[in-house]
Amino acid sequence: MVDAVSPDRPLAVELRGVCKWYDEFQALKDIDLQVRQGERTVVCGPSGSGKSTMIRCINRLEEHHGGEIRINGESVELYEARPHLIRQRVGMVFQQFNLFSHMTVVENCCLGPIKALKLGRAEARERAMHYLEKVRIPEQADKYPSQLSGGQQQRVAIARALCMSPQIMLFDEPTSALDPEMIQEVLEAMIALAEDGMTMICVTHEMGFARTVADSVVFMDRGEIVEQAPPSEFFTAPRSERTRAFLDKIL
């Protein structure tokens, strides 16, 4: 059981009336969402409900077409010409690991701090080793991605994102490409990150993770937020019939 996040904490992420279209198809419909600093929000829903699109809009991998998105009180549109500055503050881990196959694990982790943050190689390596230790694979530092399991590669991807010292972490179904036996090791790395107080928005169908870690669970369907509640309410007394039908299928 997680403790409730104080409403006095500043907002880390705020979406107000956010809309997104792909030609004639509206993928996001007037999305309102608030995530406070240190809050862990899990987003679930059927395929095509807009979950991934929503979080990709938060760090400007996708452009929204209506409404407003604010990160720590600042509109993301202030960074229109420099979206990389938003991505330094908002880390993201994807379904696929997206590691550079020709680089070792530690080189993958060092690349961003050296190129974007202008750290020296020694400092970047020290930071990389710190986060590889955090996700419990420091012994893999000098191996290449192809020498690792899928779960290990995803943990490297988490460490790589953390090396940019983000204030917020986004996860887009980080375990969906993994074999079942590898899922737990990635979830454990994410739980450790949550326990450190990282602000997190995680798109996932891992409902055990949602029950254990989330402060808030968001259910999306057809581009809309249907329901949002603490896990204790979301899983035991969902208000929407659509939410109940979804939970009946996956629990």
Image: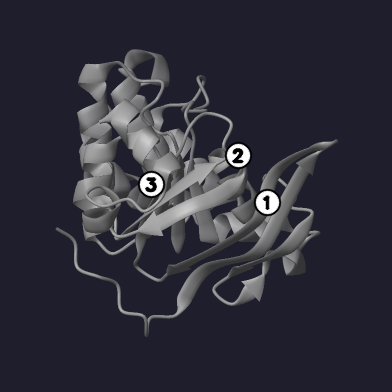
The residue that mark 1 highlights is 29
The residue that mark 3 highlights is 125
Camera-nearest residue between 127 and 37: 37
Instruction: Specify the farthest residue to the front.
Output: 241
**87 above or below 105?**
below
**Amino acid marked by disc 1:** Lys
Q: Position of residue 34 (x, y in %)?
A: 49, 67
> Which residue: 65% across, 60% down?
85
> Which residue: 49% across, 55% down?
120
**Amino acid marked by disc 2:** Arg
Q: CA distance from mark 3 to mark 1?
A: 43 Å
> Would you identify the image quadrant in which residue 17 lies?
bottom right
The residue that mark 2 highlights is 222
Q: Is residue 224 left or right of residue 187?
A: right
Q: CA distance from mark 2 to mark 3?
A: 44 Å
User: Does the rendering let one see residue 134?
Assistant: no
